Image (cartoon, rainbow, N blue to C red):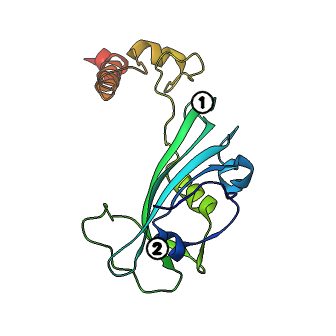
Amino acid sequence: MATAMTKPTSERSKYVDLARAGAEIRRNIAAAACERLSEVVQDLEDGEVSLLFSQGDEGQVIVAGTVRMNCRVDCHLCMTPQPVLLQADIAGIVQRAGQAAVKPPPDKFDWDRQPIIVSDDYLNIVEIAEDELLLHLPAQVCNRVDCENRPEMSFGDANTTENIGLSVEEDHPFAVLQTLRRSAGSGSARNDPADGER
């Protein structure tokens, strides 16, 4: 098996040649080369990518591997940047833009994915790695209930929140609706002017 490990990540490689050689590529990825990813995360560090190329029975160019990069991503609640290891698996068949869908090889991988679309005979490894990391950005990076930066959650004024005992950790959040209904019902009974006339 041929292994290419010394070429810079900015260099494009002819993917058919890589597949025929059964090439395995392990390379560092410079954070500065990942401009799109740098726009949505903070403090992106250099990472690494590992790709294995092979050829299917009908000449398909098969790519499989992983990519990893460290960065910081804003917490979805308090917006405080949290350290995150971005990691994604890469698995697909290289396909030229405008080309008919390439038939997946049997019993190779889970092929429930889109093909890797390229515009010519060359493959930009950095672009492939960056695309996968963008697709695998975490929706939630922090689960700390006791986080000191976590904003307080309340509905209505402070007195109402205190009276109904609403809590961020409430196991049964819809129970508060029943409490409000009981409070509203008893309040209307006390304030009904018709009670004084009976």
Which amino acid, by three-letter code, is at mark 2? Answer: Arg
Residue at image position (51%, 76%) is 16
Mark 1 element type: strand
Mark 2 element type: helix
Q: Residues within 10 Å of mark 1 (few under 14, many from 20)?
A: few
Give the labeled residue for mark 1. Answer: 82
- Work out whether residue 139 can be spotted: yes
Residue at image position (30%, 20%) is 189
Asked if the residue under mark 2 is in contact with the one under mark 1, i.e. CB atoms within 8 Å, the reply is no
Q: Against 174, is 165 above or below?
A: above
Q: Quadrant of the C terminus?
A: top left
Q: Quadrant of the N terminus?
A: bottom left
Q: Which mark is residue 196?
A: none
Q: Which mark is residue 20?
A: 2
Q: Nearer the viewer, residue 9 or 84?
A: 9
Q: Against 66, is 144 above or below?
A: above
Residue 162 on image: x %, y %:
46, 13
Left or right: where 8 falls relative to 192 = right
Q: Nearer the viewer, residue 30 or 198?
A: 30
Residue most toward the front?
A: 1
Residue at image position (34%, 82%) is 58
Q: Nearer the viewer, residue 126 or 74?
A: 126
